[in-house]
Amino acid sequence: MRVLEVKRLKKIYSWMSSHYKRLIIRVFDSFLPLGGELDLKGYVVLRGYIPEGINLEEKDELEKFLLSDRYILDIFQSYIGSKTFEYSELWEAPSSSSSGVWHHDSVGHRVKVFVSLSDASDNLGTQIIPNTHKMCYQDYNHTRLKVSKKNEAEAQLITMNRRDVLIFDTNAIHRGVYGKRTRIVHQFELCTGLKGKMLPGHIGVRSD
Ligand SMILES: [Fe+2]
């Protein structure tokens, strides 16, 4: 009996939290411009874009460059309406991860920027299905998706060399392709501040 009650309560909580997330996401996302170059496919790849003079290991230097480059700023501004990074970290890809399953990031529209510190190897990288960035999802608790063979065939694998930049909307259907070789990126995120506060743990500073 107790086990059944707990299960039922969990179900109710899951239903409420999914509705809450969907409402917050729908409302905040409706104010976003969602235009410009990023809107064409849901991602933009800039090859060798970070100049040699910028020290990739210095996050502050890299951040300063990204936030002073007119072309990049225009991509941010015309899509997400923000020019502020709310979260950043140096990230080293593990050999496998749950991000290797097709998914969206459960937060609606959010821009992620990867700057690669390593060179591409063994076809590892990020796969994105073009033009899925404007999808509306019903469930923001369960974000792992089954993708049709047709959609999978359209997926683009973006492998990155040092100094390449990938900018994408994490609302698009994507997955990481993992393997033994090391892949290191600085990642930066842009979103609207208030939405981040109302969806704790997903946007901005992580609680764990
Ligand atoms: Fe993701």
Image (spheres, rainbow, N blue to C red):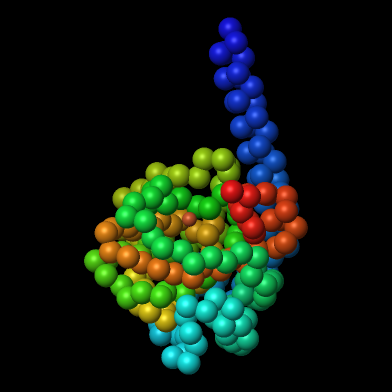
User: Where residue 183 sits: x, y (%)?
Assistant: 36, 67
| Left-right relation of 44 to 85 | left
Q: Taking the image as drawn, is residue 169 in sight?
A: yes
Q: Nearer the viewer, residue 62 or 66?
A: 62
Q: Nearer the viewer, residue 153 or 142?
A: 142
User: Where residue 74 sits: x, y (%)?
Assistant: 62, 81
Looking at the image, the residue that sits furthest to the right is 194
Determine whether 184 is above or below 205 in the image: below
Determine whether 33 is above or below 136 in the image: below
Query: Residue at the location (47% across, 80% down)?
Result: 56
Determine whether 198 is above or below 63 in the image: above
Quarter occupied by the N terminus: top right
Query: Residue at the location (67% across, 75% down)?
Result: 83
Q: Nearer the viewer, residue 182 or 129?
A: 182
Query: Residue at the location (61% across, 32% down)?
Result: 14
| Left-right relation of 41 to 29 | left
| Left-right relation of 187 to 16 | left
Q: Taking the image as drawn, is residue 168 in sight?
A: no
Question: Tag count in the figure?
Answer: 0
Looking at the image, the residue that sits furthest to the left is 122
Looking at the image, the residue that sits furthest to the bottom is 53
User: Where residue 111 sits: x, y (%)?
Assistant: 57, 66
User: Where residue 25 sits: x, y (%)?
Assistant: 67, 51
Looking at the image, the residue that sits furthest to the front is 58
Query: Residue at the location (66% across, 44% down)?
Result: 21
